[in-house]
Image (cartoon, grey):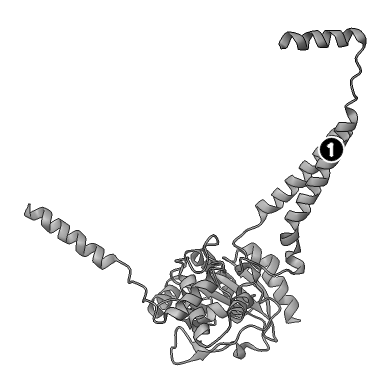
Amino acid sequence: MNRFLLPLAVFVVLVGFLAVGLNLDPREVPSPLIGKPAPLFAVPQLEVAEKTFSPKEMLGKVWLLNVWASWCVSCRDEHPILVAYSKKGNIPPVIGLDYKDQRADGARWLTQFGNPYQLSAFDADGRVGIDYGVYGVPETYLIDKAGVIRYKQIGPITPEVMEKKILPLARELDK
Amino acid sequence: MKSIAVILLGLLLATIVSAKEAAPLAEDPVVEQRMIRITEELRCLVCQNESLAGSHADLAEDLRREVRGLIREGKSDDEVKEFLVSRYGDFVLYRPPMKATTVLLWLGPFVLAIVGLIALILYLRRRSLSVVDAVLNDEEKQRAEALLKENQ
């Protein structure tokens, strides 16, 4: 009996490790920015080039910074979800960051697929993206009233992520 | 014959037109060398099996540009690495620092090796104890000797 117990225990532990390993997504690198102030920037807006946007303007509000681009394929999956939620109006204000895009392409994208953003900032050379540690668009940051990053979604927001993670946390932060 | 020449010319033009614009050559070889030395130790986040120095991903290109800028500003190697770690986390370092979260990564293999070694020693000891020295009676001894002789 004892002869089989030990190999069995080792086997079970090994299977446990492998099961956890299989469920981890190597593309999801935890951001060191969570719990830190959102990096400040000032860049032109996408639609009105003369106006700039800076995260300072959002102090005192819980808001979402959604990094997108017209060339980004998974943004097409995510976009309808953002549009639907913004129509319902029960999500925090969403600011877009059009990342390494052409102005005309970005604007056309919004006319074509709808605009869920209060406004979109235009990050032509990707420098803002670097400060936020963006490495795979779309990415979304939940930022609290004090301007601290509380959550980062890497990859498209799904209704499940929105309902289970982003909205409950946003409500919590809004209290 | 003429038509073939025309087709070849067309193909040649097509390659010229579609060829990607060559990346500008290093303006400053010293900066470039340091940039490569630093980025060889860093992981590209888009193609995770490639170093930042060798990746052709757009982001890698941007980050190399940032690193060049930092070097020109006179930042030290550690400061450049810190710039990237503060944005992308320890994951970008091929040699992550020893921390509470990376202890398992650093010590795990040694712990496993030691556990394996102890298990092996225990197993061998138990086995050598369980083998009892064989005792032969006279008849068996004679037979054994006879067999040994036969073989000679």
Residue shown at 53%/81% (left/top)?
A128
Residue at the spot of label 1: B123
Q: Which amino acid does label 1 sit on?
A: Tyr
Q: How many labels does the image show?
A: 1
Give residue B92's position: percent from left, percent from top.
Answer: 60, 69
Residue shown at 77%/9% (left/top)?
B147
The residue at the far bottom in this view is A50
**Quadrant of the image for the C terminus of chain B?**
top right
Res. B149 visible in picture: yes
Q: In the rendered view, tell whether residue A106 sits above or below residue A40.
A: above
Residue B48 position by quadrant = bottom right
Q: Which of A94 and A24 is in front in this view?
A: A24
Give residue A113's position: percent from left, percent from top.
Answer: 46, 70
Determine whether the residue tagged by mark 1 lies in a helix, strand or loop.
helix
Q: Nearer the viewer, residue A131 or B96?
A: B96
Q: In the rendered view, tell whether residue A114 sits above or below residue B1.
A: below
Q: Is residue B152 left or right of residue B8?
A: right
The residue at the far left in this view is B2
Q: Which of B42 and B140 is in front in this view?
A: B140
Q: Which of B36 and B70 is in front in this view?
A: B36
